[in-house]
Amino acid sequence: MNKTLIVAIASVVVGLLVWWCTSADAQEYDYNYPEQVETYEDPVILNGDVNADGRICMDDSIQIIYHLWRDGRDLPCTNAADVDRNGSININDVLLGLHHIFFGEYINDCPVECDGVTQPD
């Protein structure tokens, strides 16, 4: 039984190593030049993606709620928090984000820049 367990563990380790070595990240890195700095493009942030994680989900609406009514915390991307694109952050932005998540309601999913500031109502 011990030999079977060792073979199973070794197979998993070898499989993970093969997967890692063939992944895109491992192929892009030049091991001859360890001082090489990898560069990445800035992520595209969509309207409604308040926390800029690449997805429009419930935590984006929750961050707007906390910003407006709980502790006034700063939003990672205030332009993305203006979901209805009317120039202000309010309850309509929260509801539109939740309707998009639960009912598939359309929101303008244009890319936004996060350096602009939109004032809350």
Image (cartoon, grey):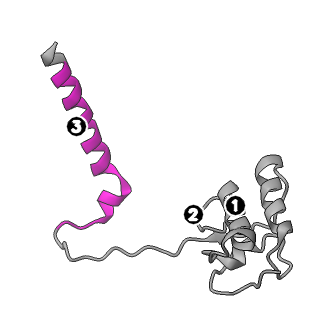
Query: What residue sits 67% from the left and 65% below the top?
Result: 63
Instruction: Judge by depth and name the residue closer to the eye, 118 or 36.
Output: 118
| Disc 1 from disc 2: Cα separation | 14 Å
- Is 16 situated left or right of 96 in this image? left
| Disc 1 from disc 3: Cα separation | 42 Å
User: Quarter holding the C terminus?
Assistant: bottom right
Tag nearer the camera, 1 or 3: 1
Which of pointers 1 and 2 lies earlier in the amino acid sequence? 2
Circle number at residue 14: 3
Q: Main secondary structure of the magenta part?
A: helix
Binning the other alpha carbons within 10 Å of mark 3 as few (below 14), some (14 to 19) or many (20 upward) gives few
Magenta stretch bounds: 5-31
The residue wearing badge 2 is 53
Circle number at residue 62: 1
- Asked if residue 110 shows in the view, the reply is no
Query: What residue sits 75% from the left and 70% below the top?
Result: 69
Instruction: Judge by depth and name the residue closer to the eye, 90 or 103.
Output: 90
Give the amino acid at mark 2.
Answer: Asp
Binning the other alpha carbons within 10 Å of mark 2 as few (below 14), some (14 to 19) or many (20 upward) gives few
Give the amino acid at mark 1.
Answer: Ile
Query: What residue sits 77% from the left and 74% below the top?
Result: 82
Q: Position of residue 81 (x, y in %)?
A: 73, 72
Image quadrant where residue 86 sits? bottom right
Image quadrant where residue 113 sits? bottom right
Q: Position of residue 13 (x, y in %)?
A: 23, 37
Which of pointers 3 and 2 lies earlier in the amino acid sequence? 3
User: Quarter holding the N terminus?
Assistant: top left
Q: Is residue 26 highlighted in magenta?
A: yes
Position above or below: 18 against 99:
above
